[in-house]
């Protein structure tokens, strides 16, 4: 590894001068532009790279941000993670990732790993894995700047960013209601997911206000820890075999909705002519499904950006010994109407 002393020797200047230039210190402005350019040219020729570990020990700043994901292969996580990375890149921070692999019991292990690497803050992408506030007790006790994306923790000690799930499913059901649908089937999310209750609450509240009857015989519930295509397909088959008439279906998420469309099609029901289908999430593939899926867009990129902004400000406050309080942001969803929904047939 090339050291700063070697760069100084090759440049013909002192180690202190090289250090000021390569660290872009304010005092480097006193050094001539010609000297600064020579130092950077030599450093590049020799392949010098700063020792971030040594620098973090001296400054007690690691310039790293811990990011806990429930499944790194899930498009939901990928979109939020990309937004976080785009936001923190100009600040000189870099993300250290920990993947729960859809297993909430791994949270403490991942958290301990990130803290042992001296991350300056934590962003946890919690949705849809169910993570209780107690999981963050250790973070709160140690005053680690942290934000949870995907869970509304208003009133707690940890900052949070979440989509308004109730508003999202209200929009989805109102869309079908306005199209003349009254016989509607539902596939609810698993009980273990915090979003499931909120999304169902939005459906019930709109139905109550509109005088729309929810037939319990047309309601199914995902039973796993997360939604899967196979279970979405199976539950849709159960609804079809129940021989109860329904002209529309509201799915817990896009994955379930696309599986439902497949099951309906294989049973001879054309979407949307025979049955309209609405999802939730607006993952990229939903726009290219056959037919393109009507779904609730929950602004994942915005959630990632807001989460990064919050934790960045919390880190800054901690570094400056300023008091700070938890911040909570709720993102408004919007309905994206595509070709999987149409007016109810007479």
Image: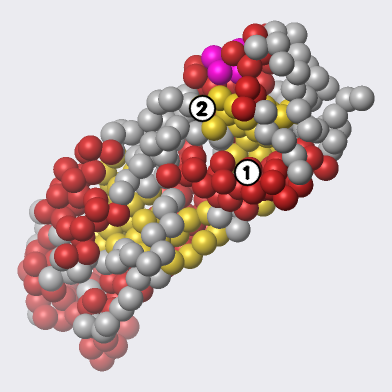
**Residue, far right:** 346
Q: Residue at x 31, y 72 (%)?
A: 314
Q: Which residue does the numbered mark 2 point to in the structure image?
A: 221
Q: Residue at x 38, y 36 (%)?
A: 192
Q: Earlier in the sequence, mark 1 or mark 2?
A: 1
- x, y (%) of residue 124? 33, 52
The colour mode here is: secondary structure
Residue under the image location 92 percent in, 25 percent down? 346
Rendered-image quadrant of the N terminus: bottom left
Mark 2 is surrounded, within 10 Å at the Cα level, by few (under 14), some (14 to 19) or many (20 or more) other residues, namely some
In this figure, which residue is indicated by the disc labeled 1? 204
Rendered image quadrant of residue 343: top right
Q: Is residue 325 visible?
A: yes
Confirm whether residue 293 shows in the render. no
Q: Nearer the viewer, residue 114 or 233?
A: 233
Between 246 and 151, the one lying in front of the other is 246
Q: Secondary structure at mark 2?
A: strand
Residue 184 locus on image (x, y percent): 72, 29
């Amino acid at each position: 590894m090339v050291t700063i002393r070697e760069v100084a020797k090759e440049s013909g200047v002192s180690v202190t001068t090289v250090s000021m230039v390569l660290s872009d210190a304010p005092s480097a402005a006193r050094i001539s532009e010609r000297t600064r350019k020579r130092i950077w040219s030599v450093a590049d020729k020799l392949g010098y790279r700063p020792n971030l570990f040594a620098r973090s020990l001296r400054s007690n700043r690691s310039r790293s941000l811990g990011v806990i994901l429930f499944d790194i292969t899930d498009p939901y996580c990928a979109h939020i993670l990309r937004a976080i990375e785009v936001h923190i890149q100009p600040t000189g921070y870099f993300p250290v990732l920990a993947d729960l692999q859809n297993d909430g019991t791994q949270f403490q292990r991942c958290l301990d790993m990130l803290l042992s690497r001296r991350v300056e803050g934590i962003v946890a992408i919690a949705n849809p894995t169910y993570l209780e506030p107690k999981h963050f007790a250790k973070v709160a006790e140690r005053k680690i700047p942290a934000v949870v994306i995907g869970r509304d923790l208003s009133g707690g000690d940890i900052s949070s960013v979440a989509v308004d799930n109730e508003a999202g499913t209200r929009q989805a059901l109102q869309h079908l209601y306005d199209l003349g649908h009254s016989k509607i089937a539902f596939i609810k999310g698993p009980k273990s997911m915090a979003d499931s209750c909120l999304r169902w609450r939005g459906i019930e509240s709109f139905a109550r206000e509109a005088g729309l009857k929810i037939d319990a015989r047309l309601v199914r519930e995902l039973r796993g820890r997360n939604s899967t295509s196979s279970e979405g397909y199976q539950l849709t088959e159960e609804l079809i075999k129940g021989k109860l008439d329904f002209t529309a279906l509201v799915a817990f998420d896009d994955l379930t909705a696309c599986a439902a469309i497949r099951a309906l099609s294989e049973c001879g029901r054309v979407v949307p002519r025979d049955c309209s289908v609405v999802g939730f999430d607006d993952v990229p593939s939903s726009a290219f499904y056959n037919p393109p899926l009507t779904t609730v867009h929950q602004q994942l990129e915005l959630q990632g950006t807001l989460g990064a902004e919050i934790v960045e400000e919390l880190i800054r406050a901690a570094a400056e010994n300023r008091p700070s309080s938890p911040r909570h942001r709720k993102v408004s969803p919007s309905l994206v109407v595509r070709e999987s929904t149409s007016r109810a047939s007479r």
